[in-house]
Image (spheres, rainbow, N blue to C red):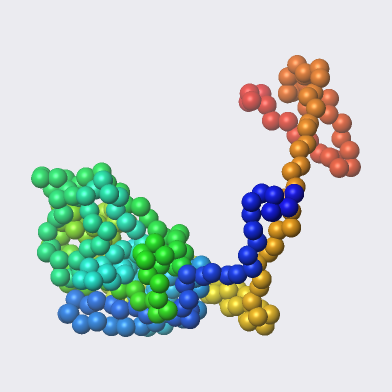
Amino acid sequence: MALAKLGMEYVNEQTGFYTGNGIVRFIEHLGDGTKAEFTLENVFPFTSIADIKRMIWIHEEVQGAVSYTPKFVFMAYQKGELYSPVEFYWPKNTGLPEAFEDPLVAEFVPNPNLVDAEGNRRTFSPHLNLSLTLEDSLRSNAININEVVIHIWRLNQILQEDPSQVTASLFAGFIRLYFPLLDDIEILDDAMSNEADEASESYAACQVYVGDRQQQLMHLQTIFKEHNGLNLISCRSIESLHVKIPKILPLPESLEILFFELKLSTALPYLRYFSVTPD
């Protein structure tokens, strides 16, 4: 069957949304009011948000500092004076906006949409975008630019080296507004360290994973450049194949009897039967 008969038309044209050069610029907001900048290279359109956070963690200027562990880092796109989270969004039934104030500037009080009058945590959970690709993230946030800029905050810069000031109500109503992956207030002490945990199995696995993945992607990128890219696959026709399996007649008395009646062959040299009863 031809595509035209299905009302379809083949167009040999690639229309990418993300047109960047593989470089993502990060602006980090620090507790003393200053900002620091660094870049990641070879960030492809299909790189996931989770992988971008991992790439930050193993960046040469970070080198595995515990405070840069993905769950202790908040990433956002700037929208005017506000910031829209990159790796999650709160559902509309929470009453929370799509973009928030800079957490270093926002009033350090529990958000009433996340805690009740007694300070108890409400049962809301955010939708996570960690598996979303960079291109899809830019599209969903209506950001169509050549230079991708992501703002980041580390939790220890917000706490200013004093996690003891955080009550259960503040944790549920302010900290989790920006760091919703954190479930236990006791973990705040871990977020304060700017040193690398050399014994961290997670960091070691992250290094191997990101390193291997980037090596594979760079190899593919080299192939694309050598062949001037790849054309889209064209579909000449669509075929429909139906296979009808005849019923087994007469029906076996049981699966056990059917099993023992099966014959072994070179194609099926071994069979084992597992009974539903222990004996």
Residue 171, given in percent of the width and then of the height, sits at: 19, 56
Q: Which residue is drawn at 74% across and 58% down?
A: 236
Residue 68, given in percent of the width and then of the height, sits at: 33, 72
The one of 145 and 9 positioned closer to us in this rendering: 9
Q: Can residue 257 be seen by looking at this rendering?
A: yes
Question: In which image quadrant can residue 176 be found?
Answer: bottom left
Q: Which residue is drawn at 79% across and 23% down?
A: 248
Residue 118, given in percent of the width and then of the height, sits at: 10, 44
Question: In which image quadrant can residue 154 be found?
Answer: bottom left
For the image, the number of numbered tags is: 0
Q: Can residue 207 be seen by looking at this rendering?
A: no
Q: In which quarter of the image is the C terminus?
A: top right
Q: Is residue 238 above or below residue 200?
A: above
Q: In this view, does 90 lie above or below 252?
A: below
Q: Residue at x 89, y 42 (%)?
A: 266
The one of 138 and 238 positioned closer to us in this rendering: 238
The one of 166 and 277 positioned closer to us in this rendering: 166
Q: In this view, does 67 lie to the left or right of 50?
A: left
Q: Is residue 223 left or right of residue 263?
A: left
Residue 264, given in percent of the width and then of the height, sits at: 87, 35
Q: Residue at x 78, y 32 (%)?
A: 244
Q: Is residue 30 left or right of residue 254?
A: left
